[in-house]
Amino acid sequence: MNVYDSDKMKDIFLSHNILPTDDYTKADFVVLNTCHIREKATEKTFSDLGRFNKKGKKGQTVIVAGCVAQAEGELIQKRAPYVDLVIGPQSIQSLDHFLKKDDFKEKAITEFDAIEKFDTLNQIKTNHSSKTAFVTIQEGCDKFCHFCVVPYTRGAEYSRTVYEIEDEIKALVDLGVVEFTLLGQNVNAFHGKDASGNTHSLASLINHLSEINGVERITYSTSHPISMTDDLINLHGTNEKLMPYLHLPVQSGSDNVLKLMNRKHTRDFYFDIIEKVRKVKPDIALSSDFIIGFPGETDKDFEDTIDLIKRVKYMNSYSFKYSPRPGTPAANKKMISDDILDERLFQVQQLLNEQQMEYNKKFITKTVSVLIDGAGKHEGQLKGKSEFNQSVALLGEKKIIGQIIPVEIKDVLSHSLIGERA
Ligand code: 5AD
Ligand code: SF4
């Protein structure tokens, strides 16, 4: 979502004829868009800010946006007084207002107003050069998992309207985009209204969007198991534009830990969803997030996570050491020792990597459909993405960038596939 918000801020700058540059030392404006999900991000923010202060051009306007800005606005102003403006993730549209005034003296804008955010952003011209795009359809979270800062930094759950989303997608189609990732912290809790005031579920929205000419692929991220309704599950068996890929974070395989985390479901509930999804789409690629070493996680709890991973078999997943976040209910709980955390993370990552390799190897000699989205690392190479969300490299001419073509898989690397046009 930060990529999406950064693109929107770029659109605002472009609407004021301010162009992007790769060299921050010569830039008139620097915007640091930040993430607060784990601890390291705050320290990284301050080290980046120090660099801007030292090497940035004289008179440079420094803006800190995103969730670190939201949560640590006062600290930023204290530790980095040269920062001109601090804007929270639901206030990025205020950039337009400051550029109009050409005055950045007001120090911190951290209101939660998703309606104003999108009302303003809808008026700004969309620019986009790649074939794939993120589109935020829902923002914020009311679930309050005990480890997570999102409900505090991105605010309450808010769904955009169906017509606003449709307009944005049509504008992106006109710019050549064919693949859309619908975004939300709780994307499957989407409940946006149409022009007649009727509420739509995510499944209904996806059906509607897939009728737009030029939309070839749709996927959505990130979902919560308790909002995985049957209409959405069944859509994976019926809607051909919906990519056969599902990122459904479970965080832990232990009922005790799920309870401590306030995830509001059990491991069996998760297994039931996976079973239902695989029934309607047997070859669906599954992915998850795992938090390792949440306070109170015992050896047995950890074994339950390993067991869940072995039972589900993922195509790829993200795993993180638990990081205490200020203001969350788990923040002051006793931490598990670093040695144990490191060992558990290592075991989980090893298993997930093995599963990814195993999953990918099954594709050798098979043909997948690849959206070619740019030049590869080596001369003459192109890169793209399969419908299962795998990175694919192949030889080919640049003129086919943007096309979806059949590719026969010849070989597998640890995180990508190598193929030839079929
Ligand atoms: N510590 C570690 N990982 C976290 N995540 C969210 N909060 C924390 C935290 N405090 C992970 C979750 C989530 C992903 C986006 O980040 O796995 O799904
Ligand atoms: Fe954070 Fe997701 Fe839990 Fe919401 S559902 S609190 S965004 S982990």
Image (tube, helix red, strand yellow):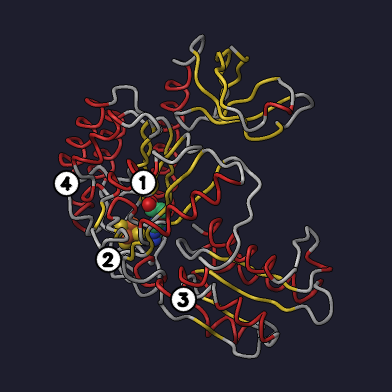
- The residue under the point 43% across, 50% down is 320
| Among numbered discs 3 and 4, the one appearing first in the sequence | 3
Q: Is residue 63 left or right of residue 275?
A: right
What residue did someone put label 3 on? 71
Mark 2 Cβ and ligand 2 under 8 Å apart: yes
Give the residue type at disc 2: Asp
What residue did someone put label 4 on? 266
Nearest the viewer among 160 and 376 is 160
Crowding at dot 3, Cα within 10 Å, few <14 / some 14-19 / many 20+, comes out as many
- Mark 3 vs mark 2, foreground winner is 2
Q: Residue 368: x and y, percent?
A: 49, 19
| Among numbered discs 1 and 2, the one appearing first in the sequence | 2
Mark 1 Cβ and ligand 1 under 8 Å apart: yes
Give the residue type at disc 1: Phe
Is the Cβ of the residue at disc 3 closer than 8 Å to that at disc 2? no
Secondary structure under the numbered disc 3 in the rendered image: helix
| Among numbered discs 2 and 4, the one appearing first in the sequence | 2
- The residue under the point 42% across, 55% down is 165
Mark carried by residue 142: 2
